[in-house]
């Protein structure tokens, strides 16, 4: 932003915040069904099928009363567990990518001449995620 401010684009520049999640792990879980009673029922079903590694999720979140079956760094690890559970007859297993929610920013420039475009490109150098393209 400091680099762009030096170009003094004023109203010709718009900044857009774009929600972004950096995936750092993958949760294998059974979604909540019917509150605590539903979670207890699912746990009993898991035990009947020989599954012993699980955790009933608590707290104030949409996953309250979901049954966590494992957290993996890679999606492949999560898929492997989901496949093993399916072989054991466990149904309804889901995989949820997890990680910090942040914003990335996109800038839109209007009515830009060639020298100003060059200055914008220079301002973006050193930012590996910076991509410049012409909007149509």
Image (spheres, rainbow, N blue to C red):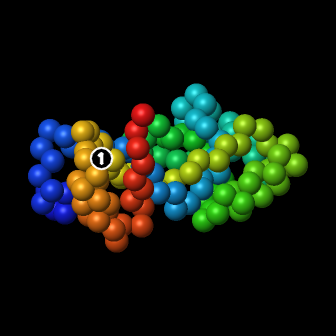
Residue at (25, 47) in percent of width and height: 113
- Horizontal and vertical percent for residue 14? 23, 41
> Going by the picture, which residue comes out furthest to the right?
87
Closer to the camera in the image, 34 or 109: 109
Residue at (24, 56) in percent of width and height: 115
Query: Is residue 110 in view from this perspective?
Result: yes
Residue at (23, 54) in percent of width and height: 116
Q: Is residue 78 left or right of residue 126?
A: right
- Place residue 15 in its image quadrant: top left
Q: Is residue 25 left or right of residue 41?
A: left
Mark 1: secondary structure: strand
Closer to the camera in the image, 43 or 23: 23
Seen in the picture, residue 28 relative to 12 is either above or below; the reply is below
Closer to the camera in the image, 102 or 116: 116
> Going by the picture, which residue comes out furthest to the top?
34
- Horizontal and vertical percent for residue 53? 69, 59
**Counting other residues with Cα less than 10 Å from the Cα at mark 1, is it few (<14), some (14-19), or many (20 or more)?**
few
Query: Is residue 100 in view from this perspective?
Result: no
- Place residue 18 in its image quadrant: top left
Closer to the camera in the image, 61 or 56: 61
Number of numbered discs overlaid on the protein picture? 1
- Place residue 125 in its image quadrant: bottom left
- Horizontal and vertical percent for residue 73? 60, 65
Classify the position of the C terminus by image quarter: top left
- Horizontal and vertical percent for residue 1? 20, 58
Q: Is residue 48 left or right of residue 132?
A: right
Residue at (42, 56) in percent of width and height: 131
Residue at the disc numbered 1: 107
């Amino acid at each position: 932003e400091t680099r762009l401010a030096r170009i003094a684009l004023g109203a010709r520049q718009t900044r857009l915040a774009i929600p972004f999640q950096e995936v750092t792990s993958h949760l294998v879980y059974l979604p909540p069904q019917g509150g605590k009673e539903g979670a207890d029922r699912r746990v009993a079903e898991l035990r009947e099928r020989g599954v012993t590694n699980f955790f009933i999720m608590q707290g104030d979140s949409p996953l309250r009363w979901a049954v966590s079956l494992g957290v993996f760094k890679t999606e492949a690890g999560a898929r492997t567990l989901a496949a093993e559970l399916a072989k054991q007859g466990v149904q309804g297993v889901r995989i949820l990518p997890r990680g910090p929610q942040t914003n990335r920013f996109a800038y839109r420039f209007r009515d830009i001449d060639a020298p100003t475009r060059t200055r914008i490109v220079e301002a973006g150098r050193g930012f590996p995620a910076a991509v410049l393209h012409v909007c149509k």
